[in-house]
């Protein structure tokens, strides 16, 4: 296609009959709660209390995989389901049951099917089962253990102040890694078993102080590997049974082929394109069943699938049309995975996101040549045609990305689905090398979860750590560390002053820095405590052998004990624009122009701009604050303030170590992201009025995007502001959302 051609194509998807029927079936499926996993895992843990924790975990997941319901989607060419119905979500009571009982049994604050958003079917007959599950786990969950371990200040930070928050990790596992799919599909799960047997035989019981831990790991790893092989065999049996009953000869052949495939993968290496996709589906679903974490991503899909595509084209077993259909089928199969969150957590993750990210484009890490290939375009076509939010599609751009590819990406973006996301190779690779990544691994990055870069098959830790509410830290810095909403004060400003008594702008900035550093410390305590509890209570052998098989198996260590090559813990910062805009208002109006005093502004904030008895009035002061130039308009002074504040936060975070530091991996620190998902709304709900003119308890800014309504100088000015930030310091990812109305694109 020449770049002079029109790139605007029909907005109608192009689907085969098979994909169209499958798409209608899956998208018509309503969200629901599946109790099977919760019941099965509870039964196993209740009846087996004499096993090492990692072996207990492996056996419990094996029990789930061998007894849960399985089915085949109508017309699908792939097998694999996470729950008893498509788009139903399993229960994970080992993490927390308080919210499960509160919301599913007592329907507080809403019945699941009457929530304001993200509604779920819950069958009446399942409630007694859920109650039984909750009764057994009370006092034995991850959350229960955490509450006994965390200091009072950290608990108050999380529950009361919401200055730092780790909520989602009270309710589920880590997730947030990209399995080593290239290694897995090329070697097969039997290779993992063989290597674990060798590792077990070579343990040095005389000299290795970790010999018992290694023994337990290898035994658990083999249990997990055999579990997925037997899980696939169940589908082979089912496909053969359905084939015997099938009257349509075409579907009968498809089912028999599926049965043969399921007996081969994932035990053995994939032999062709379809087998490679089936392999990935099995490993992905099994990790989801073990972990419950979001952000379990696929890595560089186009790079590891291209050889199978080329081989199929060469031997005549594959066409581009069939490869597209299989990819679309794969996308829809993945879309059936789901996760149910508490209502509080849902507010942070509206839209039931799973963050199952799939990356295309970029460069070849060996040659640095453009890596765009046939599968890059096929993935775009599949996204265009399926129009489902999962998997999340990511595109890597660099200086040599072909124009044809860029324009095809633009066509898909134009649909308005929010996909794909676009990432800058030059910035992201620098950010990763700043955190210790070797150059080759940095240039081989994929996106994990939302926006977080990582080396597929090599990164443990987690990219999507907890939240840092920078706007809340700013607010408390204006009141000498006191939260106006709750009255709680955990840390007074070092200068002991408030907005009313600051004698210079520098004192205001110093107060914010002081509060921010304190709550980063609280964040580190939250992160490291939960990691320690997971290591002791709920290590995940299946995630270990699929996420990082080339390091966890040779080391004989799961991820939480240092089994990965790289290990970094990400922190998501909230309120970039609000902090910059507020500090600039203080600097400009109070100390430079001197049109109002700190006391006047503080009173206006305390009264949410409503007091009309003062001179100037609250509304007048609000108007002054709103009129001050804002981040997102290419105004150096406020943009550089945003740059410097975020750089301070990023550097402070990276000074803290996680629990894997010094235990093998490269990194082992916290690091910074500017992702928010939908958390900017609930975090805004705990923040009073702020000097940027924002009213009390309203949403704060999304990611590092300008505050809504304040970027009045056009999209290029907003981009220029964002580009001034030290994005190379945000090694856990930079989020800038730019939204256009359909009318603007007409």
Image: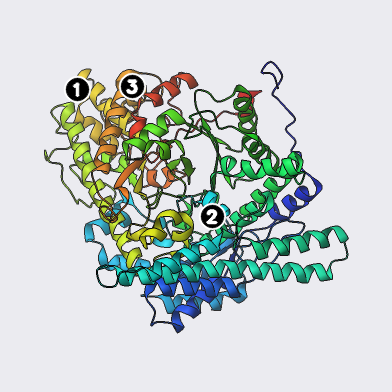
Dot 3 falls on a residue whose secondary structure is loop
In the depicted structure, whether residue 342 falls above or below residue 430: below
Image quarter of residue 265: bottom right
Residue 541: x and y, percent?
A: 44, 65
Extreme residue in the top direction: 4
Q: Residues within 10 Å of mark 3 (few under 14, many from 20)?
A: some
What residue is drawn where x is 40% and y is 24%? 723
One can see residue 108 in this view: no
- Horizontal side, residue 507 vs residue 30: left or right: left
Dot 1 falls on a residue whose secondary structure is helix
How far apart, in angstroms, are the residues tagged by discs 3 and 2? Answer: 55 Å
How far apart, in angstroms, are the residues tagged by discs 1 and 3? Answer: 13 Å
One can see residue 572 in this view: yes
Between circles 1 and 2, the one closer to the viewer is 2
- Horizontal side, residue 286 vs residue 157: left or right: right
How far apart, in angstroms, are the residues tagged by discs 1 and 2? Answer: 61 Å
Residue 572: x and y, percent?
A: 37, 44
- Mark 3 lies on residue: 628
- Mark 1 lies on residue: 591
Dot 2 falls on a residue whose secondary structure is helix
Residue 565: x and y, percent?
A: 37, 50
Mark 1 vs 3, N-terminal side: 1
Mark 3 vs 2, N-terminal side: 2
């Amino acid at each position: 296609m020449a770049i002079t051609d029109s790139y605007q194509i029909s907005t109608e998807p192009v689907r085969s009959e098979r994909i169209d029927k499958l798409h209608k079936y899956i998208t018509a499926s309503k969200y629901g709660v599946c109790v099977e996993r919760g019941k099965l895992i509870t039964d196993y843990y209740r009846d087996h209390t004499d096993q090492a924790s990692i072996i207990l975990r492996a056996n419990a997941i094996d029990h789930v995989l061998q007894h849960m319901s399985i089915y085949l989607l109508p017309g699908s060419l792939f097998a694999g389901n996470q729950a008893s119905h498509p788009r139903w979500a399993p229960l994970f009571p080992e993490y927390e049951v308080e919210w499960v009982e509160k919301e599913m049994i007592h329907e507080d604050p809403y019945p699941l099917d009457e929530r304001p958003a993200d509604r779920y079917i819950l069958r009446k007959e399942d409630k007694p089962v859920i109650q039984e599950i909750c009764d057994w786990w009370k006092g034995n969950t991850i959350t229960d253990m955490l509450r006994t371990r965390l200091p009072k200040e950290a608990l108050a930070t999380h529950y009361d102040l919401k200055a730092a928050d780790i909520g989602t990790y009270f309710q589920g596992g880590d997730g947030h890694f990209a399995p080593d799919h290239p290694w897995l599909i090329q070697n097969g799960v039997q290779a993992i078993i063989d290597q674990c047997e060798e590792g077990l035989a070579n343990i040095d019981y005389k000299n290795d102080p970790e010999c018992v831990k290694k023994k337990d790991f290898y035994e658990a790893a083999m249990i997990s590997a055999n579990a997925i092989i037997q899980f696939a065999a169940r589908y082979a049996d089912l496909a053969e049974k359905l084939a015997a009953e099938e009257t349509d000869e075409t579907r009968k052949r498809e089912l028999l082929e599926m049965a043969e495939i399921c007996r081969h993968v994932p035990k053995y290496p994939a032999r062709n394109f379809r087998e490679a996709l089936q392999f990935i589906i099995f490993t992905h679903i099994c990790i989801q069943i073990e972990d419950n974490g979001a952000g379990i991503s696929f890595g560089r899909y186009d790079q590891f699938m291209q050889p199978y595509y080329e081989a199929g084209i060469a031997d005549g077993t594959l066409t581009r049309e069939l490869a597209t259909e299989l990819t679309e089928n794969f996308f829809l199969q993945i879309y059936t995975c789901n996760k149910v969150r508490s209502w509080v957590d849902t507010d942070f993750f509206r839209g039931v996101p799973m963050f199952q990210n799939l990356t295309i484009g970029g460069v070849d890490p060996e040659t640095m040549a453009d890596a765009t290939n046939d599968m890059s375009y096929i993935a775009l076509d599949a996204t265009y045609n399926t129009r489902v939010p999962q998997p999340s599609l990511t595109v890597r751009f660099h200086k040599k990305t072909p124009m044809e590819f860029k324009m095809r990406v633009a066509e898909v973006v134009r649909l308005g689905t929010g996909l794909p996301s676009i990432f800058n190779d030059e910035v992201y690779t620098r950010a990763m090398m700043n955190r210790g990544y070797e150059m080759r691994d940095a240039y081989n990055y994929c996106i994990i979860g939302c926006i977080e870069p990582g080396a597929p098959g090599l990164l443990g830790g987690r990219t999507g750590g907890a939240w840092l509410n920078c706007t809340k830290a700013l607010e408390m810095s204006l009141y000498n560390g006191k939260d106006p909403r709750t009255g709680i004060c955990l840390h007074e400003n070092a200068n002991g002053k408030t907005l009313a008594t600051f004698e210079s702008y520098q004192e205001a900035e110093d107060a914010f820095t002081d509060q921010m550093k304190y709550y980063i410390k609280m964040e580190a305590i939250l992160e490291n405590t939960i990691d320690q509890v997971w290591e002791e209570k709920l290590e995940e052998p299946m995630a270990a052998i699929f996420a990082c098989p080339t390091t966890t198996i040779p080391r004989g260590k799961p991820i939480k004990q240092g089994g990965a090559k790289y290990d970094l813990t990400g922190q998501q910062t909230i309120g970039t624009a609000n902090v910059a805009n507020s500090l600039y208002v203080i600097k400009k109006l109070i100390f430079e122009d001197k049109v109002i005093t700190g006391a006047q502004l503080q009173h206006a904030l305390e009264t949410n701009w409503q007091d009309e008895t003062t001179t100037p009035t609250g509304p007048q002061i609000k108007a002054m604050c709103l009129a001050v130039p804002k981040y997102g308009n290419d105004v150096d002074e406020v943009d550089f303030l945003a740059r410097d504040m975020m750089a301070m936060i990023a550097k402070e975070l990276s000074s803290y170590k996680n629990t894997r530091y010094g235990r093998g991996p490269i990194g082992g620190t916290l690091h910074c992201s500017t992702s928010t998902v939908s958390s900017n709304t609930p975090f805004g709900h705990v923040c009073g009025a702020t000097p940027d003119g924002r009213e009390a308890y309203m949403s704060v800014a999304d990611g590092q995007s300008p505050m809504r309504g304040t970027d009045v100088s056009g999209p290029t000015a907003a981009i220029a502001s964002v580009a001034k930030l030290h994005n190379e310091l945000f090694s856990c990812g930079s989020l800038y959302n730019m939204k256009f109305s359909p009318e603007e694109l007409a």
